[in-house]
Amino acid sequence: MDYTNIEPFLADVPAGGEHAALIPVLQKSQELHGYLSKELLIYISDKLGIPRAKVYGVATFYAQFRLTPVGKFHILLCQGTACHVNGSGEIAIALRNYLDVADGGTTEDGVFTLTDVACLGCCSLAPAMMVGEDVYGNLTPKSAIDIINKIRSSYGK
């Protein structure tokens, strides 16, 4: 795979600042490639002169980084306190069964990735989920599945 699109960003890293720049480099790389593949992490390691174990350690420590591709639609299902007490656990079970994925999993067709998150900051809408930039609240297992079906039908798959 060609990773030269991150070269301009790597060129901006000041000499001696490789370790301090690692997180922004990983963020930009994920933004450009969708996730951090093993090959991309090796490329970054080689280009910045940072040991591969250090690069991998940072990429796996922070929840913001993904080591596998996500679907076209990334579903973030809130599991914060307000959502939890209002039924997000039942919604998680319904969505996992319906989509046939585990937490963090992507549907076989690559359309949806389902991820439990600690909080979306939408407590007044509990239970809530985000799909892309869209927030859906006051969910039930049925309404969550209806939303997924509506998205799927508008996507054409």
Image (tube, helix red, strand yellow):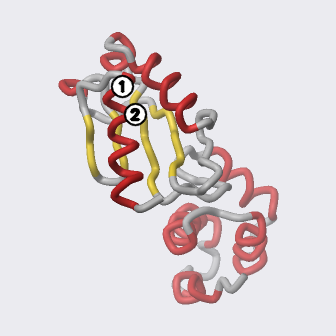
Decide if residue 29 is on the left or right side of residue 147. Answer: right
Percent across and percent down for residue 102 are 63, 33
Task: Specify the quadrant of the image occupied by residue 15.
Answer: bottom right
- Mark 2 Cα-neighbour bin, 10 Å: few <14, some 14–19, many ≥20: some
Q: Which element is circle 1 on? A: helix
- CB contact under 8 Å: marks 1 and 2: yes
60 vs 145, nearest the viewer: 145
Name the residue type under label 2. Answer: Ile
98 vs 131, nearest the viewer: 98
Figure check: 138 above or below 40? above
125 vs 46, nearest the viewer: 125
Percent across and percent down for residue 128 are 31, 30
Percent across and percent down for residue 60 are 68, 48
For the point 66% across and 83% down, which residue is it? 3
Q: What quarter of the picture does the N terminus occupy?
A: bottom right
Mark identifier at residue 142: 1
Percent across and percent down for residue 110 are 59, 57
Q: Which element is circle 2 on? A: helix
Decide if residue 101 is on the left or right side of residue 98. Answer: right
Q: State how far apart marks 1 and 2 are (Cα).
A: 5 Å
Q: Is residue 21 visible?
A: no
Figure check: 42 above or below 134? below
100 vs 55, nearest the viewer: 100
Task: Specify the quadrant of the image occupied by residue 139.
Answer: top left
For the point 73% across and 51% down, which residue is it? 57
| Number of numbered discs on residues | 2
For the point 51% across and 39% down, which residue is it? 115
Name the residue type under label 1. Answer: Lys
Mark identifier at residue 145: 2
Q: Is residue 146 visible?
A: yes
Decide if residue 48 is on the left or right side of residue 32. Answer: right
- Mark 1 Cα-neighbour bin, 10 Å: few <14, some 14–19, many ≥20: few
